[in-house]
Image (spheres, rainbow, N blue to C red):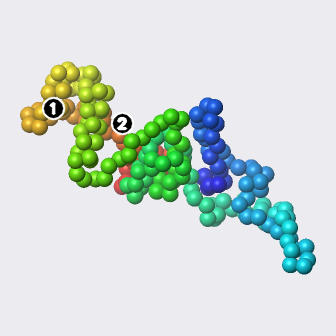
Amino acid sequence: MFRHGTELARVLTVKEEDSAVISTMSRDQFIAACPVRFVEDVGDNKTRPAPPPTDVLQHVYLTPPDLPLPYLAGVTRVPTFGADGSMQNEPGYSHASMSHYVAPVGLVIPPVGEWGGNLRDMQVARAKRLLVHELLADFPFDGWDRTRIMTAYSSDEGEKLPASLLNAIALLLTPLCSPYDPRANTYDSGQ
């Protein structure tokens, strides 16, 4: 159970459609999912389950902004970074990103190495190759053809990659690297 906007919500998944949505909760759904269990005294130090007092549940249901529940900004289908820089690549809720990650069926994400050493360098090289060589090199950024882009990509010295290619890479990565700001319904620039 989460707070979403000014309402109580939950994440519903439909396995057959490989989808997930935020569903706001009606009063009856809230009562059914209420994490607090009530009991009544039946004498001789014995208790039995009891229905929750309606007035108490009504009061709790109508005050979601004050409930100590995690805030849910959205559901994501891709790993994201939280405001603290942590990567959310495990399915479920992340306090840092205030989002619920639901991985597509069959998606396998290889582990990300520590920031340092040869493993990191190999992963950065692999990511650069994927973005430049395999994804974007065929587009005529700043009038460059594939050969010229690949020559600049492969060279440590000489021509730098065209600015429009680097901007395209930034455009692709920004949604993954920026924490989501639910107040503005935009991505937060961190300023």
Look at label 2 and name its amino acid.
Leu
What residue did someone put label 2 on? Answer: 172
Q: Is residue 86 visible?
A: yes
Residue 154 image label: 1
Q: Position of residue 181 (x, y in %)?
A: 47, 51
Q: Residues within 10 Å of mark 2 (few under 14, many from 20)?
A: few
Residue at 73% x, 64% y: name it: 36
Instruction: Say above or below: 156 vs 69.
Output: above
- In terms of depth relative to the viewer, which is nearer, 76 or 127? 127
Q: Is residue 184 visible?
A: no
- In terms of depth relative to the viewer, which is nearer, 40 or 95? 40
Left or right of residue 98, residue 134 in this image: left
Label 1 or label 2, whichever comes before in sequence order: 1
Residue at 82% x, 68% y: name it: 39
Instruction: Say above or below: 31 vs 48.
Output: above
Report helix, strand or loop for mark 2.
Answer: helix
Quarter assignment of residue 18: top right
Look at label 1 and name its amino acid.
Ser
Please identify the residue farthest to the left as the structure is shown: 158
Q: Position of residue 157 (x, y in %)?
A: 8, 37
Residue at 71% x, 61% y: name it: 35
Residue 115 image label: none
Quadrant in which the N terminus appears: bottom right
Instruction: Say above or below: 103 vs 130.
Output: below
